[in-house]
Image (spheres, rainbow, N blue to C red):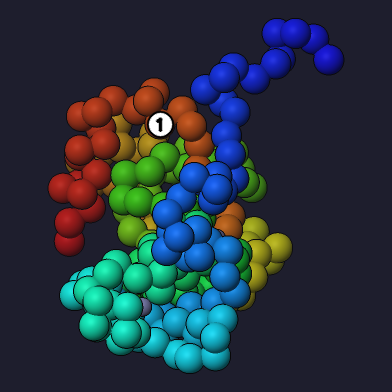
Amino acid sequence: MSETNAPTPAQKTALAPDVRRLDERAARAWTERMAVRPLGDGRYAVDSQSGATYVVDLTERSCTCPDNQIRHNRCKHIRRVGIEITTRRVPAPGKRAASCDACGIETFVPEDDDEPHLCAACRLENGDVVRDREADDRLVVVRVTPERADEVLIEGVGETVADYPTNADYPADDLVAEVVYLSDLTRSASPRRYSFPLSRLERVDDAEIVDRDLREQVPAATQE
Ligand SMILES: [Zn+2]
Ligand SMILES: [Zn+2]
């Protein structure tokens, strides 16, 4: 291995704090066997090593254990909930666990969100430039709908998005994304929208090639 590939000091990282240097509560929060279960509304049940279960309320910064209730300490249970959120073992207040509707990986989504749940890798935003995996065209995302490919009829064709021949390789329950062709944007003030199965689209990093003006034009151009 060449010396030039050696990590810089800034790239080296510890995976846990040095518990020998922590005060006792902080060290126990890291090392004791506990289980944290999200209850919603910023509350978490903590099953402690001793067998007792306490409820931590992060918005109130309180815990039902004696250390917090009687001695008013920021107890090991409150600290443990914080650690588990930071390490993404449990969702932060206001979030809940859900499977990504596109790839199935577990992700954290807003607690009261009816939108499709997409992980960071699958999420497409209005204005994102994507590549059509079949035709290699560049498209601009107008909207990711909550509808499935086998539920959406293509106007003028009479087939669902799932049944459309070039979509045969994509799942029938894929979410449908509405897109416009990047090339149409330069030619028309109201380019035609097309419906694609989400997994047929791949986000591309050459978004910067698109004029800022062009991107801002997308929402206005597609209002109906
Ligand atoms: Zn506690
Ligand atoms: Zn995903």
Image spot of residue 46 (x, y percent): 45, 82
* Amino acid bearing label 1: Ala
* Residue at the top extreme, as displayed: 3
Image spot of residue 69 (x, y percent): 24, 83
User: Which residue does the image show at 42% across and 63% down from the upper left?
Assistant: 25
User: Which residue does the image show at 20% across and 29% down from the upper left?
Assistant: 213
Q: Considering depth in this image, is 64 or 203 the residue closer to the camera?
A: 64
User: Which residue does the image show at 83% across and 15% down from the upper left?
Assistant: 1
* Residue at the right extreme, as displayed: 1
The quadrant where residue 72 appears: bottom left
The residue at which mark 1 appears reads as 207
- Relative side of 32 to 223, left or right: right
- Give the mark count: 1
**What quarter of the picture does the C terminus occupy?**
bottom left
Q: Is residue 157 visible?
A: no
- The secondary element bearing badge 1 is classed as helix
User: Which residue does the image show at 32% across and 78% down from the upper left?
Assistant: 67
